[in-house]
Image (spheres, grey):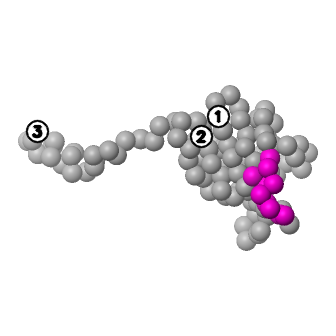
Amino acid sequence: MILLTLALTAAVAPAGAAPVPAHVARSCADVGPPQSDVGLYKIWAQRLSCRRARSILKKWYYDRSAPDSGPSGWACRTFSRGQYTLRTYCFQGRKKISYTQYLA
């Protein structure tokens, strides 16, 4: 019985299937109005979950009184990547959120 359990466990969990370490950047979904050209795209989160990163960015993106420089409490740097494209990198301690913003 024990050998059968071990064999089934080995078959279900492939070798090398380990959880993603916190320091590895994750690609997250977009933030912005659906069916629109404006919004935040190519969002990457490092040392925080995609859910948390998107929550931070949603709160900032939809708050009209928020500063253009990025979410409150985060140090952000923005670089122009084209006429209508900005790439922003935000840091808070060891946490990092980056995203591309298309402007209309």
Q: Which mark is residue 95?
A: 1
Which of the two discs, 3 and 1, labels the residue nearer the N terminus?
Answer: 3
* Crowding near the residue tagged with mark 1, few <14, some 14–19, many ≥20 C-alpha atoms within 10 Å: some
Say if mark 3 contacts mark 1, CB within 8 Å. Answer: no
Confirm whether the magenta stretch covers residue 5: no
Mark 3: secondary structure = helix
Up-down: is 29 above or below 97? Answer: below
Using the rendered image of the protein, determine whether residue 40 is visible from the camera's viewpoint.
Answer: yes
Q: Nearer the viewer, residue 86 or 56?
A: 86
Up-down: is 18 above or below 83? Answer: above
- Is the N terminus in the top left, top right, bottom left or bottom right quadrant? top left
Residue 53 spot, x, y in % from top left? 66, 44
Q: Which mark is residue 2?
A: 3
Residue 83 spot, x, y in % from top left? 84, 64
Q: Nearer the viewer, residue 69 or 60?
A: 69
Q: Residue furthest top?
A: 93
